[in-house]
Image (spheres, rainbow, N blue to C red):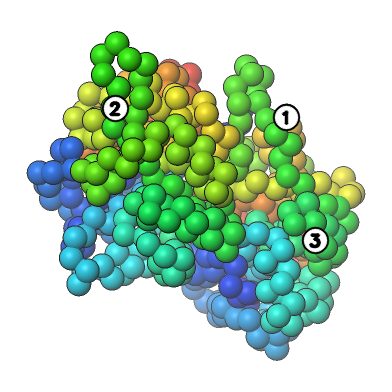
Amino acid sequence: MGSIAVVDYSMGNLRSVAKALEHVAPDARIVVTSDAGEIAQADRVVFPGVGAMPECMRELEVRGLRQVLVEAAQSKPFLGICLGMQALFEFSEEGNVAGLGVLPGKVRLFPLEAMHDTQGQRLKVPHIGWNEVHQAVPHPLWNGIANGARFYFVHSYYVEAGNPELVAAFTHYPFAFACAVARNNIFAVQFHPEKSQAAGLKLLANFAAWNGRAS
Amino acid sequence: MGLAKRIIPCLDVTDGRVVKGVNFVALRDAGDPVEIARRYDEQGADELTFLDITASSDNRGLILHIIEEVAAQVFIPLTVGGGVRAVDDVRRLLNAGADKVGINTAAVINPQLVADASSRFGSQCIVVAIDAKQVSVAGEPLRWNVFTHGGRRDTGLDAVEWAKNMERMGAGEILLTSMDRDGTKIGFNLELTRAVADAVGIPVIASGGVGNLDHLVDGVHKGHADAVLAASIFHYGEYSVEQAKRYMAQHGIEVRL
């Protein structure tokens, strides 16, 4: 099963991600690391993160992790989670900063004027809680996960993919946004699989066994 | 179908044990926190909240071990509050495995803490806990003040205004406890809940007073809460979390089943 590097750049709850991976992949070597060499050597990379985008990009810069992440995202099974998904894109409205630019598209704030449901009830931001994930494409990471299964979300910004073919799943809040994207060896999710009980653990187990091919 | 309303069992922890009191006094032992957390996870809890009510500073560190242990076994969001006074306390709890940290008294003493913690760790992990008590008298429009120190000290702050202020400071969520109702089992203070939930753009968790499943339904329908929190109805086996969710679903509330 090899090694899985969980990228540590001091943005949030890495322990949860590592614990969940240890739980689903007891034979894998899970390393929580901010060392570029270790990330480069790992068989798989998980890029997690919660917090604010400007801080995230600054921390990556300070630790000299930009290059190794871009390379990993081009070469081996790579899972972005939450902020780790958003950072893969070109630009974020949160602090108006550039991301890693691995994927085309930008990260936008939920527009306050649109945040009400069909009954006119106000929808709160951050989008916190369990929402349905509608799979847009078949993918090895969806194996054994029901289409429409609920995952745990907590975010105020969402990805607007520059290419509709990137979208692997969408969620309604109140409009459809890309809650998962996929391209070649990259899979990235806005929700938190490490906090999404059975469905989330299944997705992480699928990642730990994934060969990095989209089909 | 969209975002589900959340059902959140709350574990008050002191000296390493889960306890539950009435109006913040008369504590009764309810068991081992790790065991209870696992049980609620199996029953389908959407999230768990731990409130550290340990009085002595000697045993303050215990909560970190408990959270570490729970986080290694339970893969749903964990919120931890109680005794959080500085950005470093927030960091320690997050590192132990908490996903969100509740700030209560310290936010009143130093509102800047909410701004500092949310800009460092993100709004999404900063929950401001508000303990509110009705202060208006009969005949007056309803008014609630923020209380601290376990409900003993009136801050003079209006609860609705305070919630709006905390939203501006960067809180990602409000945990709203009615001190008049806590432990009474007569239901949420729905007027208070609705007043706060309608006043802010961030999610509001209703807390204090749940005695039966209709109270949970009312919290959402009449209180406009985004999530409902309860302790004793779950701790002593009156209802399981799953029963609560099925009941809410039967009453037209979207839940995760």
The span from disc 2 to disc 1 (Cα, nearest Å) is 33 Å
Disc 3 marks a residue whose amino acid type is Val
Question: Could you tell me the amino acid type at mark 2?
Answer: Gln
- Residue B27 location in percent, x, y? 12, 47
Same chain for mark 3 and mark 1? The answer is yes
Residue in the image at 40% along x and 34% along y:
B159
Q: Is residue A210 visible?
A: no
Residue at the extreme top: B139
Q: Quadrant of residue A109?
A: top right
Residue at the spot of label 1: A113
Secondary structure category for the residue under label 3? strand
The percent coordinates of residue B156 (x first, y second) are 33, 38
Is the C-beta separation of discs 3 and 1 under 8 Å?
no
Q: Which residue is mark 2?
A: B134
> How far is mark 2 from mark 3, CA to CA?
45 Å
Vertical order, A127 against A44 (above or below):
above
Determine whether the residue tagged by mark 2 lies in a helix, strand or loop.
strand
Q: Residues within 10 Å of mark 3 (few under 14, many from 20)?
A: some
User: How many marks do you count on the picture?
Assistant: 3
Mark 2 closeness class: few <14, some 14–19, many ≥20 residues within 10 Å? some
Q: Nearer the viewer, residue B246 or B106?
A: B106
Question: Label 3: which residue?
Answer: A97
Q: Residue at x 30, y 52 (%)?
A: B51
Residue B171: x percent and y percent?
Answer: 52, 48
Query: For residue A83, what is the image quadrant?
Result: bottom right
Front residue of B195 and B218: B195
Between disc 2 and disc 3, the foreground one is 2
Q: CA distance from mark 3 to mark 1?
A: 23 Å
